[in-house]
Amino acid sequence: MANITIDGKQITVKDGSLIIEAIDQLNGDLPRYCYHPGLSIAGNCRICQVEVEKMPRTVIACNTTVTEGMVIHTKSGKATDSQKYALEFLLANHPLDCPVCDQAGECKLQDYYMEYGAYDPKFNENKVKKSKKAFSIGPTINLDQERCILCSRCVRFTDEVTKTHEFGMFNRGDHTAVDVYTELNNKYSGNVADICPVGALTDKDFRFKMRVWYLGKQKSVCPGCSRGCNISIETEKSRPYHLKKERVMRLKPIENPEVNKWWMCDEGRYAYKSIDIGRIEKVQARAAGRLEETTWENALVAAGKIVGEAAAQPSRWAFVTSSQYTNEELFLQKKFVKDVLRINRVAYSWSFDQGFEDNFLIRGDKNPNSAGAREIFGAGEDISQVVEAAKRGELDGLIVFGRDLSKYGADTLSVVRAKVKTILYSGVNVNATSNSADLVLPGASYAETDGTFTNFEGRVQRIRKALEPMADARATWKIVQDLAAGQGIIWKNKRAEDIFVSLAMESGAFKGMSYTALDPHGKIWSGPGAAQPAVAATAGAH
Amino acid sequence: MVNPTPNLEPVVSRYFNLPDAWKIETVLKLGAYETARKALAGKPEDVAKMVSDAGLRGCGGAGFPTAKKWSFLPKDTKKPIYLVINADEGEPGTCKDRYILERDPHSLIEGIIMSCYAIKSNKCYVYIRGEYVIPTQRFQAAVDEAYAKGFLGNNVFGTSNYRVDITVHRGAGAYICGEETALLNSLEGKRGLPRLKPPFPAIVGLFGCPTIINNVETIASVMHIGRMGAENFSKWGGGTLGPHLYSVSGHVAKPGVYELPMGITLREIIYTYGGGVRGGKKIKAVIPGGMSAKILRADEIDVKMDFDSLKAAGTMLGSSGVMVMDEDTCMVKALLYGCRFFAHESCGQCSPCREGTGWALKIIERIYRGEGKIEDLDTLLDVAGRMEGRTICVFAEAAAWPIQSYIAKFRAEFEDYIKSGKSAGKETAVHAAH
Ligand SMILES: Cc1cc2nc3c(=O)[nH]c(=O)nc-3n(C[C@H](O)[C@H](O)[C@H](O)COP(=O)(O)O)c2cc1C
Ligand code: SF4
Ligand code: SF4
């Protein structure tokens, strides 16, 4: 450990730390463009200069290692002078097209000019023109070469992180421009818009949708696969008439050193549309062969009858759910199945969620909570076994949460319906199963509820409500609680957290956990039975 | 033209005017490769000691003591050690290495064999300026001849049990690839961008391995030190610093490469050897060490042309490219040429250098067009001052120094030009040697 002083404050840092790492440990108050903790050191932007006592010149904090007793000034005349001038150089040929630039509000040129620059500009010459403006470099990203400050983060990202090498620097001197050798079309392309500190690389999906200062932000976890990348769900809540009432504007990765570092994949990033589009908005019940809108009150009465029938004939009913649900929801479902329905046929896994996998972030298992489901329900049956049983006429009814049985073929539901008298469906989005159910209870999406997911290595992480449930939708744990109440069994959970408390008391691997202990990076479960991750590194199909 | 020194046996330049000295048969008769053969029969440390005793300093620009540089190599590394010869010779006003490659390649190869032996390297890359077509052909042919004779490759000279391989690599025309770490990137097939230091190449160099980069003249000198002995080398010509190649260009009567004792005065180089100023005119200014060196006024040419004396005089020996400007030279135009060069050659990584060189060029172009303002001079100095010492490599300094020194030493001329919108004199400027 080394004891150093930064702007008069004493701090102890690891030996071999860079000055910028020490500053980030203290308060992060130092401008930087090319430095990114997830990339190699480039040292080209020259804005992170600090004064170090006994050194003749200012040094860049991103390539200077601390030594015992080092005294660093980030705000001295020499330091701020160097920072200011780096900024003036960077802005010399910048087009200053801020009013039409979509980066406004999260542009580090704007921010640092206000914070560290505020100089009187001396540049009085014609600016260098570059050819590519609002230029598509791939399915997800647009490039503006004039706005680029040549920090090389994008180049380093595709060289070092994805190793796909699309970006390069072309030309020399003040004609240097960033460009791509081949189309930017890799599975992590969206990250370059996040790390580009200026408006040079913008995300086509988000461009001009809205000004970022109107965005609401909530920390959550991506439900796209069993990695569980930490995300920020960014929403527009103030203008419900805007963009066909879409509320989620984008997802961004949030740094979690244990899970996703600074990144997320494109598939997860752009999968948010289903939160606003294709939703089951209304409670519906089948009347005279057709699904009709109804109220929660009436629907729960109808549900009470269905659940009562099931509980009376448990051997002729099956319960199907999904590892897309939170631990809390699955835990209540399990109690519902065990204590209310007393059904034995329970299935949550199937083969359809197995997909592309790499050795970076993307996991083959496309469910965010397979480990949690397995811990709570045990292995269970495969959904295909339930479907086969239904086809053979062994079942009178199905209670289905979130799984669309038509995955087994377009005619599956008609065959099943011919044999099964009743289907109760609850889920987030419309599908063939919801369309052929007798009762449809709209559930809240992951963005509309609190809870936890357990990722492939047994890390339990919180998701948080970013939005109110759409239309009539209700949090699934509430729906399950309502169904139990219909049978006279009252659970008094007011929040998802209350359920987690029970879970942590009753369920082995979750023992001893609490929401507060999960922040900020989640926690690997360690209760009895959690000696190994519930799902091995190469996750199985669920 | 090569102009050997009267009354002195030339050293590094001794074969420059000898016909066919680039062919191995010519020089073998004169004892070529005997020095290396002897060195390889001795200990590697002896070569390094001899170089140290001779006080040899790098001829690439920085004048770093060669033996000291070699001593920075890690002592027991498991990685291969590389020797890289910097033959990029891009500094405007400099053309000495070209003569060695083209007219006496075997002395360089001999120096390489000895230097590799001294630093425990078995592999040398020679990075030659892309425009040097004939020098590359000659040098490659010489390497092939040396292989054919068994002077390179496995078991050099058949007796040494020591391997030395040479690979010749051509640059592609970027000045910045003469900067040693940009050169390494270029050799690795990457964009020629200088690397952040630390780490230094002696620790992490070519392909991540310990690497020594030396200039052509430096390594050729290693052979001559071996041939003559350290003492004779350093005392050559009555001095203490050994012989040195000066490229003399500009408004002199006899431009060319001169081998002279290091420490000779600039005045002697120009008047005694360079034939004085063309047309009998007066000197206005002299750049002593390549375009990157700060300029000197006519009244400063009694300075001694060695690393320390020029440093004390506020400039540098650099690549020893002496560029003479006569009384009719327009300093605005001269600076314009300098700024144009640096703006064109900045690798573009560091914001101060990338933007500063271009910015300075635009200002000086505007002044040259007659649209200058007096405040522009301060802006120029400001831009130059802020580039200096704030970048990855010293190119930014090299770009800043002409601006600072031309304006400091000829401010009145710049102001007159700005006020009148044109040059007072005949408006000529020195075109660099290439
Ligand atoms: C911009 C720049 C260009 C350079 N160009 C050359 C060159 O063309 N030839 C050369 O020998 N050294 C050049 N150098 C110096 C090298 O970086 C390095 O110091 C030198 O090759 C070391 O050799 P020496 O120790 O034998 O002098 C250049 C340096 C800079 C900063
Ligand atoms: S496009 Fe953005 S990330 Fe890439 S070099 Fe330019 S400013 Fe940096
Ligand atoms: S100082 Fe100039 S030439 Fe050197 S690395 Fe920086 S931008 Fe490139």
Image (cartoon, rainbow, N blue to C red):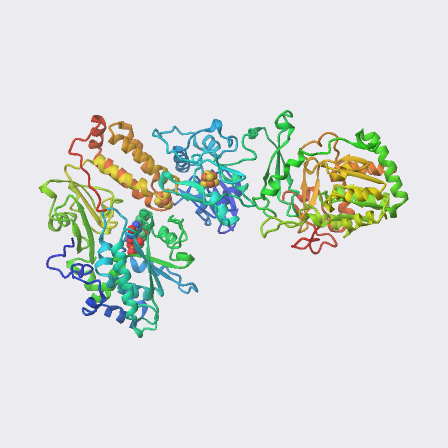
Residue with the most extreme bottom position:
B159
Residue for point 89% across, 40% down: A309
Q: Is residue A32 visible?
A: no
Q: Nearer the viewer, residue A1 or B29?
A: B29
Q: Is residue A510 above or below residue A274?
A: below
Q: How many marks?
A: 0
Residue A450 screen position, x and y as percent: 70, 38
Quarter occupied by residue A521: top right
Q: Is residue B398 left or right of residue A224?
A: left
Q: Is residue A339 visible?
A: yes
Q: Is residue A372 left or right of residue B103?
A: right
Residue with the most extreme left position:
B280
Residue A375 screen position, x and y as percent: 75, 50
Residue A357 screen position, x and y as percent: 61, 51
Q: Is residue B386 above or below residue B303?
A: above
Q: Nearer the viewer, residue A120 or A264?
A: A264
Residue B76 screen position, x and y as percent: 41, 65
Q: Is residue B392 left or right of residue A512?
A: left
Q: Nearer the viewer, residue B433 or A15?
A: B433
